[in-house]
Amino acid sequence: VQLQASGGGLVQAGGSLRLSCAASGRTFSTYVMGWFRQAAGKEREFVASTSRGSGGIQYYADSVKGRFTTSRDNAKNEVYLQMNSLKAEDTAVYYCAAGRPITSSIMAPSAYYYWGQGTQVTVSS
């Protein structure tokens, strides 16, 4: 599976961005799709995930709950991260990832097999 993330950019605090991640291959729907981010000088951290299949189950990091929403479109082989009410602390490189983690590992970067190249999100305060 190859992943290509896009949609990052510069936005003012309180604004919104929508990230997209396009995947290659016929098995897209069989993967849990995750979003992670890495700020300068910090470790990569979990942001959100959507379950395989219809994507009816999502998990979110506490820091983004109520502000970010992830969804998937299996017909297009795409996953999305809608980010609202952005804060300066959301500034990071955002990555999409594909894997088949068990629920207890869903927030662990090591549980994902495939990664996109990352897209920069910068929130100015």
Image (cartoon, rainbow, N blue to C red):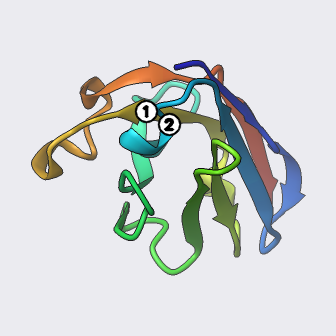
Label 1 belongs to which residue? 98
Camera-side residue of 43 and 76: 76
Q: Position of residue 29 (x, y in %)?
A: 46, 44
Badge 2: few (under 14), some or many (20 or more) residues near its Cα, within 10 Å?
A: many
> Is disc 2 placed on a helix, strand or loop?
helix
Question: In the rendered view, does 89 fall on the left or right side of 124?
Answer: left
Residue 114, horizontal then vertical, whole percent = 45, 21
Q: Secondary structure at mark 1?
A: strand
| 68 sits left or right of 33 in the view | right
Asked whether residue 87 appears in the rendered view, the answer is no
Vertical relation: 13 (above or below) 42:
below
Disc 1 + disc 2, Cβ < 8 Å: yes
The quadrant of the image that shows the C terminus is bottom right
Q: Position of residue 2 (x, y in %)?
A: 59, 18
Inspect the image, locate mark 1, and give the three-letter code of the amino acid beneath it: Ala
Q: Quadrant of residue 18?
A: bottom right
Which mark is in front, 1 or 2? 2
Nearer to us in this view, 33 or 108: 33
Q: Position of residue 52 (x, y in %)?
A: 37, 51
Answer with left or right where residue 45 lies relative to residue 13. left
Foreground residue among 14 and 9 = 9
Q: Which label's residue is closer to the chain start, 1 or 2?
A: 2
Measured in 3D between alpha carbons, the distance from the residue under mark 1 to the one under mark 2, in whole angstroms, is 8 Å
Which residue does the image show at 51% across and 24% down from the upper left? 41
On the picture, is 22 further left or further right than 125?
left
The kind of residue tagged 2 is Phe
Name the residue beneath numbered marker 2.
28
